[in-house]
Amino acid sequence: MNEHSELEGEPRSRLIHDKWEPGPDQPFRIPPVISLPHISSSSASSARVAQPRTEGYKNIKTMSAAQSAASTPSYSTPYSNIEHVFEDPEHEHYYSDTPPPGSMASQTDHLLIYPRQFVLPTGQAFTTLSKLKSSGYKNVWEPMDGDERFWQIHSEPKIAIGQRAILVKTPKGNVLWDCITLLDEETIEWINSLGGLAAIVISHPHYYTTHLEWADAFDCPVYLSWEDKQWLNRLDRLGKARTFIEGTEEDIEVRGEKIGVKIVKLGGHFPGSLVCLAFGRLLIADTLVTTPSGMGDWTKGPDGGKWGRPSGMNTYSFFWSIPNMIPLSAEEIAGMWKILKDYEFSSTHGAFKGTEVSDGAKGSDTTVKQRVLESMQIQVKRMGWRDHAFLQETM
Ligand SMILES: [Fe+2]
């Protein structure tokens, strides 16, 4: 595809730094906190500076028309001022790795009173990074899908939903796709032995966790979606780690050079949900949820003989809330495809170990991209649509 093509008249690549910029001699240093001049939302510049936190952000938050179509409809909560709550400097206590004080509990309410969220049957539970490190938790890493350009990292025992992060190795710098909570000395030492990190990119809010500690440990920026900013619940005390992706596509660059890692914003699950494309592999987190049918091996028949994947099966589902199984709408799914269809990939890799799907693998004779479209159309049809324009989409 043409990397410089435009969508709906909007440039695909737009960054807002919060503000991290490499100097010529110190490519990955996070500079000390400084005041930055405000640049108006009408600026045509591709990289723009956010306002000081205390002034709010709403006047420079924009989305392309396509992205607006793909984004989650706004959900009304009694808390109209979420951004201000979560950018409040009082939240700096989180950086000190202490448990949230009682006052914080009331501020988590707004995260729990809308239908995306859930609590365990045993109720809410909080922990801290230092508690995890002193309780025997360890990170484990191994090549993903046998490819040593991709290293999957997860924690044992399982923490929270047990997602993996994936380190993408490139000759010009490594990128960590998504984030896990536990960051210990062994992990830092191992990643440094691979050349450290040039950037961290996080698909959506519930993997934000300790991203500030990761950014600090590896002196690198963290790329997040501008649309999901309201879910940040910690002050970036160093002030310069976060870089917000405002457009629908971003090539990660190191020292001004593209490194072959492209970030694409599909929206849907969260307004700014991302996927990452590197070496033909699409890292999908749970922007696309890989289904059991998609992961299954269909090569064996009931009698042990050779078999094949039947047509009409899904490989992915598309959820607004995964734990509560609330699906995305037809319009949101169509909006995701409208963006994704321009990209080529031969495999997908979800949020959890083992969620690998490859072209023609495990009894399938179709491409992964075809399976994405089929899955989207299956879901739209099952929601009752019979004549939706999206059902006419073909590869
Ligand atoms: Fe998710």
Image (cartoon, rainbow, N blue to C red):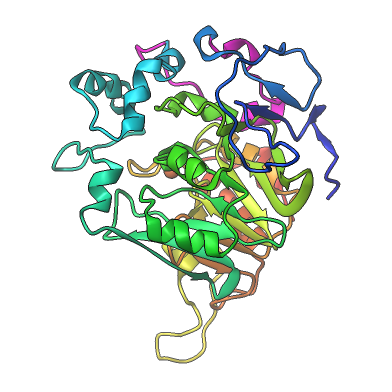
Decide: is 202 above or below 370: above
Decide: is 301 above or below 74: below
Q: Which residues are magenta?
A: 56-80
Q: Residue at x 27, y 58 (%)?
A: 137
x and y percent of residue 63 in the render?
A: 66, 24
Foreground of the two, 173 or 249: 173
Magenta span includes 78: yes
Task: Say whether residue 356 is visible.
Answer: yes
Magenta span includes 325: no
Decide: is 51 above or below 337: above
Task: Say whether residue 387 is visible.
Answer: no
Foreground of the two, 105 or 281: 105
From the viewer's perspective, tell me whether residue 312 is left or right of residue 26: left
Residue 9 quadrant:
top right
Magenta stretch, overall SS: loop
Quadrant field for ligand 1: top left
Q: Residue at x 47, y 76 (%)?
A: 297
x and y percent of residue 93 in the render?
A: 32, 25
